[in-house]
């Protein structure tokens, strides 16, 4: 059984009412379980019809206050921010920013706010929007961002995502895609989230396909993911306690408590604890999170609502990051015999698998030969008895490697509605998030016995962000056109720090067994240790006696003492204890890098409804700036905390003492850039049930660099060094250079100092949406084209010595002098366009109140690079000049699909709940997920055009069973799930 590929989750949710008297409303709420939904929905429809008749008869009389059940919103005065009375469109408006619908049931959510900021019925939004309800997330066992993508059309996850470093507004984390593009716009309650997308406190997730350009202008054209957290409710709801176990021995607890303090104040706290073990050896996940929130209506008229939320999270985990990809292991093993050996080893061959495959290509004259044609879970190695075995629990992420996230976020949201025609929202957020990790990957040698336990590095990304966001809505009717104008401003500034290990002491072997042994560490105690210097060896003595533990060593399978470094570099998993790499990184470097970008934006968004609300128009524009004022460097705390403007006063702050680089700061850390995003769309109700729509949107990404990729000024001493070496002049691209200024002028004419163009994203889309009168079928179908242009890339040809003679030059410079054999100019290019075209659809089907299903699918028929300056296109003059191997590389790049973009995807998940008989309340669920092949890499090693391995092409099945029951006055809800029923790899 495998949790990742075959997960067994047994969840016990205990739903109980408070023992104090809560009145009839609380009693009704406690009874709102799944088995009652059918009757309640029918009753609600009947009551609405009767209420309409009563209101018609008693229109002239003042109506008494209605009695409202706990599952329905309470009435409020017009224009207030407390739950309002039902409107003609069956929408109960908390405020213009929060919309709930009495159509919502189970998996069905008919409104969203992410795409338009103003809450709006999905039926009228001219974009494709998916909403994953809390019930759907629970039924599909979605506990992470990658789980969310499993049942999302046109999305593709990344199994290596968990161990990746965090992304930011400019870069994505991992390789997962939405509509074929990376996703870097991941929000929580509409505000960008840096790390750790905690699912325990999530109420629902909104996924906007294509860019929501006006509100999230700096992003990729694939879409936006927004987590909406659970908020305090003024309606009494039962507390819940959920305990989950899985077949790997993992435990999880989630609690959710809502307290109505009075008519104007409510409090809610959601907490979670996880202690999980993985299917792979040494995998684990530990998580502790707490999210208390408080909502108050300071005035009795409900025109102001204030919510304060604190999110605390601490987690650490190790997750497998690789699998057995060595398709021709037997050939590799045979080729390695008699070859060079691994350092600190006598018999282990050093021939790399990639080198072996490349030698095969050359020998066969076939440069299309892929290195990897299949992937298997686990690993192969020789066990202690000498048998070559398959270990499917093998973890390639080195033991001791781990990621650690700490999140502390405080958010206040103030909604105000002083007039019927004017509303607003102000959000303040302080997000202090810290990411730390220890990186390492364990990989095999060709002998089938030994492995290298990699210990790459440590990294720390720390971000302290302050956000201010103000939205104002103006409502007006002109000539029968109902209009809403939203205008807003956004400001965020964050201090971003980066910390790494001290390379002088990493990896540190002074605590590895054998460091004090002269056999494992030759020369120790005499001429000096060759594996670990004597003065770097750890204390290594007995706990109570103080006797040196000189015989604390690691022996190989033959009883021979291993060299200290060989404990890691020549590890034998079949006979030795797995070494842990966290011992190798005892010291961080002394300097803490830092920068402080300032993001500011102003935007306007217009919504119009006319022709009796049949025609809805949406248009908006966003102007955004990004600014930095210097480097925030701590060169050696507490003695050398570098002022942000130190580079302007090198006399007071000499660089050789304070550690900064003035040219780096002036080029990369002092600037202000502007970008524009916009969108327009229209939706038209052809019938009451069918809307058609069209939209276009444009996003951007800031590129911060110059075309030459040089810190301006750093080239000057290099040129002077060449002049000194060549007697005052040298030849450069047909020019005789005699001075530094002349050279700089030549490079300026080549465009080296021009800023790199900013990246653009475009999305064109048409579609149709359906919502039947009885809500039995609600769905969306869309056709779209997305394009990403001006992505900043290195230009390898222009960086080569042929096109940039100053780079890697050994004749202009004397060995050891400035510029010798170094890259001076890192030329960049933005001549690139990627295109995705396709269609996708989603249907939520509820033919009866007992059954609900979500069905979606996508067909992305185009996923290609249109042009890329760094790659010669087949048929071009530049292509004709390429070597055979380079021609193959270009053939693959232009002939294969873009990475991790399945052409087809289809998913369905449904659940039936019995409402009568002995099994009343029993819920049975089943799901199926299919994804066609996806390209792992457009490289010859994974050559998808010649049989290289591609992921996907798999059909996965999930089944669940749930049942509510009562014991000792408590209500229980038990869910049993088998995920990946057929154990599909």
Image: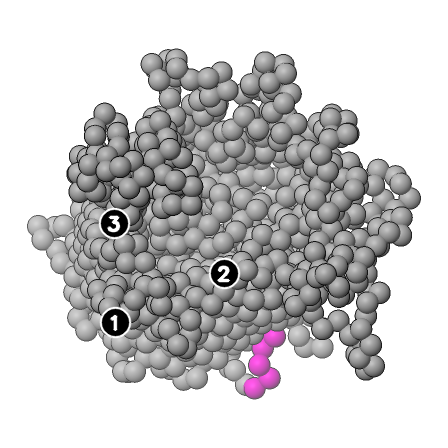
Q: Position of residue 884 (x, y in %)?
A: 49, 16
Q: Residue at x 91, y 44 (%)?
A: 385
Q: On the image, numbered disc 1 is attached to which residue?
A: 652
Q: Residue at x 69, y 29 (%)?
A: 327
Front position in the image: 950 or 689: 950
The quarter in which the C terminus is drawn is top right
Q: On the image, numbered disc 2 is attached to which residue?
A: 500
Q: Position of residue 363 (x, y in %)?
A: 63, 16
Up-down relation of residue 718 to residue 234 (above or below)? above
**Distance from Cα at disc 3 to Cα at disc 1:** 20 Å
Q: On the image, numbered disc 3 is attached to which residue?
A: 713
Q: Residue at x 31, y 75 (%)?
A: 305
Say what secondary structure mark 1 lies in.
loop
Q: What are the residue bounds of the magenta stretch?
A: 15-20
Q: Is residue 442 left or right of residue 484?
A: right
Q: Quadrant of residue 95?
A: bottom left
**Tag in front: 2 or 3:** 3
């Amino acid at each position: 059984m495998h949790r990742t590929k075959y997960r067994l989750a047994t969840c016990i949710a205990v739903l109980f009412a408070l023992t104090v008297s809560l009145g009839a409303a609380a009693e009704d709420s406690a009874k709102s379980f799944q088995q009652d939904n059918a009757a309640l929905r029918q009753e609600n429809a009947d009551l609405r019809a009767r209420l309409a008749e009563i209101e018609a008869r008693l229109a002239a009389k003042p109506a008494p206050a209605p009695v409202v059940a706990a599952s329905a919103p309470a009435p409020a005065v017009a224009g207030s921010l407390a739950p309002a009375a039902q409107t003609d469109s069956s929408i109960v408006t908390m405020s213009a920013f929060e919309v709930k619908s009495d159509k919502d049931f189970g998996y069905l959510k008919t409104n969203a706010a992410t795409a338009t900021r103003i809450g709006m019925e999905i039926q009228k939004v001219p974009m494709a929007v998916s909403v994953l309800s809390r019930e759907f997330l629970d039924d599909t066992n979605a506990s992470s961002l990658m789980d969310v993508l499993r049942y999302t059309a046109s999305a593709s996850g990344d199994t290596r995502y968990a161990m990746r470093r965090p992304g930011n507004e400019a870069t994505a984390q991992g390789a997962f895609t939405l509509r074929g593009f990376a996703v870097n716009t991941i929000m929580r309650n509409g505000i960008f989230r840096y790390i750790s997308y905690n699912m325990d406190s999530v109420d629902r997730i909104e996924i906007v396909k294509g860019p929501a350009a006006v509100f999230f202008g700096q992003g990729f054209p694939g879409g936006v993911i927004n987590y909406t957290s659970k908020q305090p409710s003024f309606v009494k709801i039962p507390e819940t306690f959920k305990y989950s176990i899985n077949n790997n021995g993992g435990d999880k607890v989630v609690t959710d408590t809502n307290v109505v303090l009075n008519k104007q104040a409510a409090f809610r706290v959601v907490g979670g604890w996880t202690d999980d073990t993985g299917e792979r050896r040494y995998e684990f996940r530990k998580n502790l999170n707490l999210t208390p929130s408080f909502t108050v209506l300071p005035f009795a008229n409900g025109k102001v609502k204030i919510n304060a939320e604190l999110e605390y999270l601490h987690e650490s985990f190790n997750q497998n990051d690789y699998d057995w990809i060595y398709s021709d292991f037997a050939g590799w093993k045979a080729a390695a015999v008699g070859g060079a050996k691994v350092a600190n080893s006598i018999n282990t061959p050093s021939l790399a698998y990639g080198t072996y495959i490349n030698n095969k290509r050359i020998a066969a004259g076939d440069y299309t030969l892929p290195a990897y044609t299949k992937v298997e879970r686990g690993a192969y190695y020789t066990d202690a008895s000498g048998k070559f075995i398959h270990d499917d629990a093998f973890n390639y992420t080195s033991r001791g490697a781990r990621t650690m996230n700490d999140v502390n976020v405080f958010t206040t949201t103030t909604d105000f509605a002083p007039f019927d025609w004017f509303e607003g929202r102000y959000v303040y957020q302080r997000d202090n998030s810290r990411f730390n990790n220890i990186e390492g990957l364990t990989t095999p040698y060709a002998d089938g016995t030994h492995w290298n336990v990699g210990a790459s590095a440590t990294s720390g990304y720390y971000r302290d962000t302050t956000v201010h966001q103000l939205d104002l809505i103006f409502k007006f009717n002109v000539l029968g056109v109902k209009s809403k104008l939203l205008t807003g401003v956004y400001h965020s500034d964050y201090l971003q720090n980066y910390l790494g290990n001290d390379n002088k002491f990493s990896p540190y072997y002074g605590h590895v067994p054998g460091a004090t042994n002269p056999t494992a560490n030759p020369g120790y105690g005499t001429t000096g240790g060759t594996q670990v210097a004597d003065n770097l060896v750890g204390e290594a003595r007995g706990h109570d006696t103080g006797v040196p533990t000189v015989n604390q060593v690691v022996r190989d399978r033959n009883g021979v003492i291993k060299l200290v470094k060989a404990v890691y570099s020549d590890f034998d998993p079949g006979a030795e204890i797995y070494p842990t790499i966290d011992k190798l990184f005892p010291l961080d470097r002394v300097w803490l890098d830092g920068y402080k970008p300032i993001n500011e934006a102003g935007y306007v968004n217009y919504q119009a409804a006319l022709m009796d609300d049949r025609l809805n128009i949406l248009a908006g524009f966003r102007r955004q700036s990004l600014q930095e004022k210097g480097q925030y460097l701590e060169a050696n705390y507490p003695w050398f905390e570098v002022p942000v403007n130190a580079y302007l006063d090198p006399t007071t702050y000499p660089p050789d003492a304070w550690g900064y680089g003035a040219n780096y700061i002036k080029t990369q850390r002092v600037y202000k850039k502007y970008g524009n995003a916009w969108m327009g769309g229209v939706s038209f109700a052809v019938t009451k049930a069918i809307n058609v729509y069209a939209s276009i949107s444009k996003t951007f990404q800031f590129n911060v660099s110059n075309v030459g990729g040089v810190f301006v000024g750093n080239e000057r001493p290099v040129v002077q060094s060449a002049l000194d070496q060549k007697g005052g002049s040298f030849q450069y691209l047909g020019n005789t250079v005699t001075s530094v200024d002349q050279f700089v002028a030549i490079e300026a004419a080549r465009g080296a100092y021009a800023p790199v163009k900013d990246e653009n994203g475009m999305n064109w889309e048409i579609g149709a949406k359906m919502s039947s009168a009885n809500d039995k079928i609600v769905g969306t179908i869309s056709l779209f084209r997305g394009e990403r242009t001006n992505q900043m890339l290195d230009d390898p040809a222009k960086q080569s010595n042929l096109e940039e003679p100053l780079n890697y030059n050994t004749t202009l410079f004397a060995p050891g002098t400035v510029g010798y054999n170094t890259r001076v100019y890192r030329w960049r290019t933005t001549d690139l366009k990627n295109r995705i075209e396709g269609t996708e659809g989603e249907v939520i089907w509820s033919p009866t109140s007992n059954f609900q299903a979500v069905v979606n699918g996508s067909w992305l028929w185009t996923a290609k690079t249109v042009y890329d300056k760094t790659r010669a296109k087949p048929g071009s003059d530049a292509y004709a000049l390429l070597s055979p191997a380079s021609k193959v590389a270009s053939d693959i790049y232009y002939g294969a699909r873009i990475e991790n973009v399945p052409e087809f995807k289809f998913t369905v998940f449904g659940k039936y709940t019995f409402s009568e008989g002995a099994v009343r309340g029993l819920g049975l669920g089943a799901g199926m997920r299919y994804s066609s092949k996806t390209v792992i890499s457009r490289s010859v090693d994974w050559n998808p055009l010649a049989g290289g391995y591609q992921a996907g092409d798999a059909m996965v099945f999930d089944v669940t069973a749930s049942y509510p029951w009562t014991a000792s006055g408590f209500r229980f809800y038990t869910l049993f799930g088998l995920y990946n029923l057929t154990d599909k790899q």
